[in-house]
Amino acid sequence: MNTEELSALDATFLELEEADPSAHMHIGGILIFEPRKDGGAPSVEEIAQGLGARLAGLPRYRQRLSEQTTGGLSWPRWDDDPRFEIRGHIRRARLPGSGTDEDLREWAGEYFSERLDRSRPLWELVVIGGLDGGRWAMASKTHHCLVDGVGSVDTVQLMLDAEPHPAPRELPGASNGGGTPPARGRSLPGASLLRLPIRAAAAGLDLVRAAAGTAAHPSRARETMRRSRALAEIIVRDELIGAPRTSLNVPIGGKRRLGVIEVDLDELKRIKRELGGTVNDVVLAAAGGGLRELLLARGEELPEQGLRAMVPVNIRSAGEHLALGNRISSLFVHLPLTEDDPRRRYELQMEEAETLKSGDQALGASAITDLTGHAPPVLHSFLARSLFATRLFNLTITNVPGPQFPLYAFGSRMLSVWPLVPLAASHAIGLAIFSYDGKAFFTVNADFDAVPDLDVLVDGIASSILQLAYVAGPQSSEG
């Protein structure tokens, strides 16, 4: 029997759900495809056959938790599920109405409002037919304790290929539908698609134990001192000086609604080329502009220090890039809102980025999560929840670059990707951005009751991009 204990980091995402029924700690997304030549969407049998071989080298997807809750003196284990059947994790759905993108967004909001069943392997896949124009879609949901979204393979992306009709392929370790799990740090093939992490909450490095070896290792001493300074900095800046209080951080329920914006990636690149900075600066500035419009429409006073966004950072080494397990930290980025002029607001956003680049905030955030990883399970939940508290950040924003070439599934070209970032308790809004094949897709995941005015935010983000494009000047004939 394959069995492995959850790490403290992985268990954090179970604990967040246990602490508050409003938190749903699954990642995933919606992938939309062009019509198939034979019409309709793939059958469950087709999906099961195609996915079965590709999951053979990933036993974690055939395992369930030994205990459905955390606590006590040890973490749950991943145990083989003797009743596992891949078809039990795949189902079909058909959109109501005329199958528009709006119909799909409404369906997706309801789909992502439902938690995964902890008595079974923690993933599922839905094939969606009935989209207008003959299109079809796949929806993926995988628990964050199983993957971190950055360095691991999600079930949907396993179905994707770089050509319409590729030769059969299998993952390493595949043998008669079985195989051994990749060792932590081992690379898996293919590009990770839905790489949408939220903040990690315990990585497992013992600073005290590391300090004991510094006399014999001067370089280790320097690193320990650097981590200590970074830890002190983040405690002062982000623990004692809390994030501002706004209507974005109120008690939420379990129901979600989604908003989606599609933008030409070249336009974002043109803005950063003309105004300076990076594409990430453009994304954050656009998000800040949309949030500014939302708070103004709600009649709220704009926080002088700006909103604080938690931006996940991948801390894997090159050799760990596609390995299973959670290996992420965070930056806390301020979004300036009080400045009315879009150019000046963008300049302030770039200045914030430069300040973070020159500091060790990501290292400090990692040091905090490292320390929590050594608490026993019975105490860890309290510490883990503190790392997702509203005093630390107002919302999560992820921006992940994807492949800039077309991908296919069952002969159909993938047209769009709507990524999903989960919402921690009392965080009513999360924003995920994913770029693919010349497009950037912004998906807002929002609490249904706390954000009835989601259209104001979505329109505000789109307007902010148009404003920045105007400030950048007309498109050149060469561009």
Image (tube, rainbow, N blue to C red):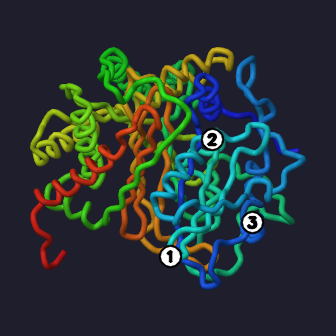
Distance of label 3 from label 1 (alpha carbons): 21 Å
Provide the residue designation for mark 3. 44
For residue 431, what is the image quadrant?
Answer: top left
3 or 1: tag closer to the N-terminus = 3
Find residue 80 and report its horizontal and vertical position in percent. 84, 45
> Is disc 3 surrounded by few (<14), some (14 to 19) or many (20+) residues within 10 Å?
some
Left or right for 429, reference 204: left
Q: Do callouts 2 and 3 mark residues in contact (Cβ within 8 Å)?
A: no
Q: Amino acid at mark 1?
A: Gly
Q: Residue at x 69, y 61 (%)?
A: 92
Residue with the mark numbered 2: 114
Q: Position of residue 193 (x, y in %)?
A: 52, 59
Tell me which amino acid carries mark 2.
Answer: Glu
Please state which amino acid type lies under the numbered disc 3: Val
Which residue appears at 39% of the width and 42% of the height?
397
**Residue 355 appearing in the image:** no
**Mark 1: which secondary structure?**
helix
| 86 relative to 384 in the view: left or right | right
Tell me the CA gap for discs 2 and 3.
Answer: 21 Å
Circle 1: is it few (<14), some (14-19), or many (20+) Cα within 10 Å?
few
Q: What residue is rendered at 46% in x and 23% in y?
A: 251
Number of the front mark, 3 or 1: 1
Sequence-earlier tag: 1 or 2: 2
Q: Position of residue 77 (x, y in %)?
A: 77, 34
Measure how far apart labels 1 and 2 are at the Cα level.
Answer: 28 Å
Q: Secondary structure at mark 2?
A: loop
Residue 133, disc: 1
Tell me: 164 left or right of 47.
Answer: left
Is residue 242 placed above or below 91 in the rendered structure? above
Badge 3 element: helix
Residue depth check, mark 1 versus mark 2: number of the one nearer the observer: 1
